Structure formats: structure tokens, C-alpha cells
Amino acid sequence: MALYAIGDLHLGLSVDKPMDVFGPGWENHVQRLQDAFSKLHDDDVTVLCGDTSWGIDFQESLADFQFIDALPGRKLILKGNHDYWWNTAAKMKRFFAENGLTTIDILHNNCHTYGDYALCGTRGWFFEEDQKPHNEKVLNREVGRLEASLKLAEGRPILAFLHYPPLYEGYRCPEILKKLEEYGVERCFYGHLHGVTHRRAIQGSFGGVDYSLVSADYLRFEPKKICE
């Protein structure tokens, strides 16, 4: 039994969204994901840190979730900026149940556990979005969602998962960083960064929290083992 994390699967089995247009690093990425997950076991848990499916609704994303459901282990899914299929928790859970997707759950306004750890998270916020007039409103909403998740840890050691990086070269999201530090998060895993932006990722200890980039192309489509 082990805990893993990986983000940005960018599956598009029912839509015309070939990822190899973004460079050779994405060639045959669906098969590479399948091969990597084949090494996992049914009692493993993997947190998927957003941008899971290109589908714009449940119908378009169903094939992607059937693919995910067939992979070994349990999967917890965060919202990413390209997850247009995302809906209310009740509707997503009903979608999973109606389609026999038994290994998938969401990490959103809630908290899961793995051994002694609390698994907390939300999408987060990123400066690329700050040209939009709803910047402050959405930032505050994400900070609130993160805090709601962190509160549910109830004294357990915390592993946090975000889609957007809360910090990277030349950028900090102080509101998110403050919550991670305030609640004593041990480790934080994030995605979103691809290609040349990998080198701008900040990893290792910052403010008492250990940060790791887990974008699929950065990990070469191998889920990152966190602990056993």
C-alpha cells in the first residue's frame, strides 16, 4: 500500500486534443500513463492534481474516467483550470456511481485520510488569471476552500495538494502560502507547469513546507510515490 501524486493527465479519449502538439515529451502519453500505473496495486491511492480530462461535460469526459477507473488503486481528483467537466460534488458523485466508476472520488471542500495523514487540497490560484476582474473573488474562494479542507485534518499531519503552484520563480501567492504554513502542512504537491516552465518551479523547503512539482510531463508520466 502506497500513496502517490501526479497532475495534468490531460486525457482526451473522446475529443480531438492530441497532446503531442506540445512537443515530443507528450508522445504516446496515454499508453505511458497506463504502463506506469500498471506497477501500482489495488490498495494504493493516487491524488490527481487537476487538469484530468479535456471533456467539457460528463459525456465527453466519460471515456477518460473509464480509463482512470480501470487503473490500479483508488484515485482522488482535484479541480484544474482546464477541467471544464467539473460540477457540484453531488452531481460528480452521481456521475461516478451511475457509470460504475468505483475507484474515483474528489478532493474538494473536504479531506481524506491515508494512514495517519490528512489529505487536503483545492485548485488554488495563479497570477496568469489576475487580468480577470473576478481575481480577488476567486482567490478568496480558493483560500476559503483550502482552509475548509485543512480544518478537517483535526490534528493529523497534513499533506496538501493543489493544481496551481503557490510559488515559483518570480511569483508567490501569499494568501495560499499563509494557510499552508498556518496549519503546519508538511508537504505540498502541485501541477500546472509544463515544458520550459518546469525550470521555474520551486521545490524543497520554503516557510517550513516541502514543495514538489508533480505535473505528468515533469514526472515522465510516472506517479510520484509519497509514502507507504
Image (cartoon, helix red, strand yellow):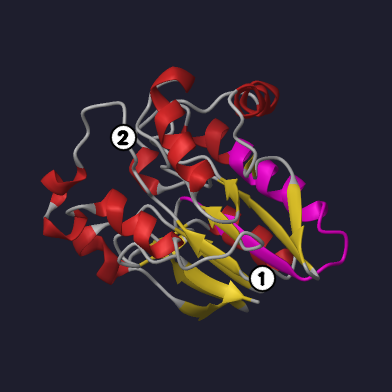
Magenta part of the chain? 140-163
- In the picture provided, is 61 more to the left or to the right than 170? right
Q: Position of residue 219 (x, y in %)?
A: 35, 67
Quadrant (top left/top right/bottom left/bottom right) for the N terminus: bottom right
Residue 148 percent location from the top left of the image: 76, 45
Q: Residues within 10 Å of mark 2 (few under 14, many from 20)?
A: many
Q: Residue at x 12, y 44 (%)?
A: 21
> Of 217 and 148, which appears nearest the observer?
217
Q: What's the distance in space between the residues labelled 2 and 1, CA to CA? A: 29 Å
Label 1: which secondary element? loop
Looking at the rendering, in which quadrant would you find the C terminus? bottom right
Indicate the quadrant where residue 208 lies. bottom right
> Badge 1 local density, few (<14 within 10 Å), some, or many (20+)?
few
Q: Amino acid at mark 2?
A: Gly
Where is 18 relative to 219, above or below? Answer: above
Displayed quadrant of residue 82: top left
Left or right side of 199 for 152: right
Q: Indicate left or right for 190 with 109 as reference.
A: left
What residue appears at the point 62 percent right and 36 percent down from the top-left corner?
A: 141
- Residue 137 position (above or below residue 203): above
Res. 1 mark: 1
Residue 156 belongs to magenta span: yes
Q: Position of residue 220 (x, y in %)?
A: 30, 66
**Residue 100 percent location from the top left of the image:** 61, 30
Q: Which mark is residue 12?
A: 2
